[in-house]
Amino acid sequence: MLSWLTTLGWGTFTHPTVWKVAAGVLLAAFLSATGYHYGWKGAEHKWTKKYEDLQADVAQKEIDQLQLLNDANEANRELEKKYAKQVASIRAQYAAEEARARADDDRTIADLRSGLSRLHLRITACDKARPSGARTAPGGANEARTAELTPETAAALTAIAADGDRAIRKLTGLQAWSASALNLCGPTKTE
């Protein structure tokens, strides 16, 4: 069968020992390749398992973070609702106080303009500021001296005071609002 090898000068290939050695080398190469292949596949499987475990861990952490975020959002929504109620209460209280005060101020100003009410101011006289011959008339038994303002002047002065009171009420309302915001959100620490 292998006689053609001997005609070419390859007679040594027909020797059984050569074939045994060749078969051994081929078997060793086959076993090495198979071992390498299965070793590579085993390592690949090992790293694939580690990668899958890592992916599962990351997915679980993402789920946990999403739950924390949802919890924080829900807590913030509750704070927003509470804050909205507090602000609405402060606004309603301010509006009621402002309406009552405006009605009182408008009634007082109308009474002063109509002459129904009068505005008297206590005055004192300074003798040094008078001309030398001028004298003041006695103001009564205890010498209390008063001056009555004209209705328009009295109404104008009362309107000025009412504007100041209105500004104070606004400031008080803003202070109540800022205090509720600080109580709700808590003070922040600055670094």
Image (tube, rainbow, N blue to C red):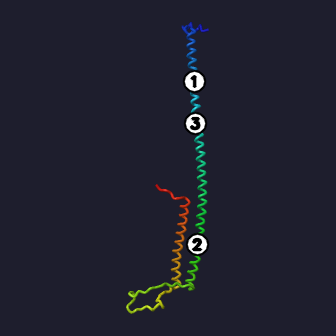
Say the numbered circle drawn on residue 51. Answer: 3
In the picture, measured across the screen, residue 91 lies left or right of residue 190, that is: right
On screen, 54 above or below 164? above
> Residues at badges 2 and 3 in contact (C-beta under 8 Å)?
no
Identify the amino acid type marked 2.
Answer: Glu
Q: Mark 3 to mark 1: distance in Å?
A: 24 Å
Identify the amino acid type marked 1.
Answer: Gly
Q: Secondary structure at mark 2?
A: helix
Residue highlighted by disc 1:
35
Q: Mark 2 to mark 3: distance in Å?
A: 68 Å
> Which class describes the residues within 10 Å of circle 1: few (<14), some (14-19), or many (20+)?
few
Identify the amino acid type marked 3.
Answer: Tyr
- Residue 117 percent coordinates (x, y): 56, 84
Q: Secondary structure at mark 1?
A: helix
- Residue 133 percent coordinates (x, y): 39, 93
On screen, 66 above or below 89? above
